[in-house]
Image (cartoon, helix red, strand yellow):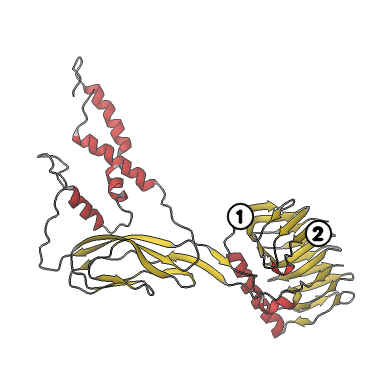
Amino acid sequence: MVRTTTPVRLFLVSAVGLLLILAPATTATAATTIDGPIGLGTAESFSVLAASTVTNTGTSVLDGDVGLSPLTSVTGFPPGIVNGTTYVADETAEQAQIDLTTAYNVAAGLTPQETGLGELAGESLTPGVYSGGELALNGTLTLAGTAESVWVFQAASTLTIGSGSIITVTGGASACNVFWQVGSSATIGTGAQFVGTVMAAQSVTANTTATITGRLLARTAAVTLDTNTIIAPTGCDAAPGTVTSSPEITSDEPSAGEVGTDYTHTVTASGTPTPTFTVTSGALPAGLALDAVTGTISGEPTASGTSDFTVTASNGTAPDATADYSLVIAAAEGDTPAPAAPDATPAPGSPDDTAPGEAARLLASSGSDAGAAPLLAVSLATLGAALLLLRPLRRRAPAGAGTSR
């Protein structure tokens, strides 16, 4: 067996670090939730709200208001019947469109509990947020819950409800609390029995004799009806839910400081409500403190060295956000810091004559918040090349030579 030289050993160790660099880091993902129904504001009273046109064919019956803004073409009433008030290009319709946009954005911003949905037929779904690309229903969908239960469906593109499809709510669940946020346009098929409020970025079309227990609201284009019945949801007296989002730390890692010099660095984080901050592991450098409300690390450092610590931002909405920091405090100008004690005495002439303690100090002073991974990364960066180096060493071993030990 050929003995590997010290440079080869270093080569092998270095390469494993490259693998650590290439390995993806894992971070917690922020979540946005709501504890009640989507607030529609002034758009709540509308059975139909559109931006370009409202067009009806046949004897449609609408329980609530009809609104159009910013354009002015509302046709087909009569023979269609509006049991509310029609608002065309006025302040009421304009404000309803503003409130619709707000509600649409709230619904689109919620974190889904289930993603990748497509066909919903045959499903019985508990309350929650569900998302997919092109959502479709060609059959029966059951929503099982209570009067307080809320469902939000997020369609990145279209929503298509097939002819004769049926949505059923059970257990005392209410049509007031079913919302469909549609990234483009929605179509409700002939004879379908649909439940919920459609909030479409573009248009909504209800085909012949489809019944809607809810609302058809279009942000930028038309609503088209054909002999439809739109039944206003009843008992919608629950207050709109409060939207909360878990924290996400957004600030850079702290810069280095110096003994005897005022130091300040602010850790910032997004999230609703506003997060508070705590040091959950390790410790700040001597002389510094963290303000739990503002996230500001401040004070006058009293000792040089490197401090490793973790800051956690929390606001009651999971998951909390954490960030690992290494804060370097340099000695005051003119002072001579004591040398770090080596962990072991290297062999004379060894390329490893930088003491491990000193190596750790140099790593910390780099400002990395990844712990020991960067040192290993540098060390292991050449694993592949080292493996190639071993083969020529084997070939150069003298013929008949004994095995080295």
The numbered mark at residue 59 is: none
On screen, residue 373 above or below 272? above
Where is residue 269 drawn, in percent x and y? 42, 68
Contact check, label 2 and label 1, Cβ < 8 Å: no
Residue drawn at x 77%, y 59% is 167
Q: Residue at x 24, y 65 (%)?
A: 285
Q: Residue at x 57, y 61 (%)?
A: 111
Q: Is residue 116 left or right of residue 119?
A: left
According to the picture, the residue beneath numbered tag 1 turns out to be 114
Residue matched to label 2: 189
Dot 1, how many residues are within 10 Å of its Cα: few (below 14), some (14-19), or many (20+)? few
Mark nearer the N terminus (2 vs 1): 1
Residue 384 falls in which quadrant of the image?
top left
User: For this view, does 271 lie left or right of residue 228?
Assistant: left
Left or right, 354 with reference to 192: left
Q: Residues within 10 Å of mark 2 (few under 14, many from 20)?
A: many
Give the image location of residue 141, x and y in percent.
Answer: 75, 55
Tell me: residue 274, above or below residue 379.
below
